[in-house]
Amino acid sequence: MEIIFVLIPLGLILLLFAVWAFFWAVRNRQFDNLDAEAWRILMDGDQAPPPREPADRDR
């Protein structure tokens, strides 16, 4: 029964941290455009790689 006196304040501290982290993320615009980041990983490979220069070989 004594453990409840530890777990309740610990749970409240964890809850306060989660609420603070959520409002920090909203304030820093982390949730503004969720679709663009999801599509960015799919569109990343559309560009052709830069041309490779021939390696210098001394023979």
Image (spheres, rainbow, N blue to C red):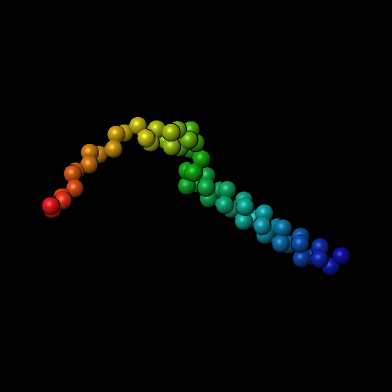
Residue 35 in the image: x percent, y percent? Answer: 48, 33
Residue in the image at 84% along x and 67% along y = 2
Q: Which of 52 and 16 is in front in this view?
A: 52
Residue in the image at 43% along x and 33% along y = 42
Is residue 47 in view? Answer: yes
Which quarter of the picture shows residue 11?
Answer: bottom right
Q: Nearer the viewer, residue 42 or 22?
A: 42
Is residue 36 in view? Answer: no
State left or right for residue 7 relative to residue 20: right
Q: Which residue lies furthest to the front in this view?
A: 59
Whether 59 is drawn above or below 10: the answer is above
Q: Quadrant of the N terminus?
A: bottom right
Q: Which of 43 and 3 is in front in this view?
A: 43
Residue 47 in the image: x percent, y percent? Answer: 31, 33
State left or right for residue 56 relative to residue 29: left
Q: Residue furthest right?
A: 1
Residue in the image at 15% along x and 50% along y = 56
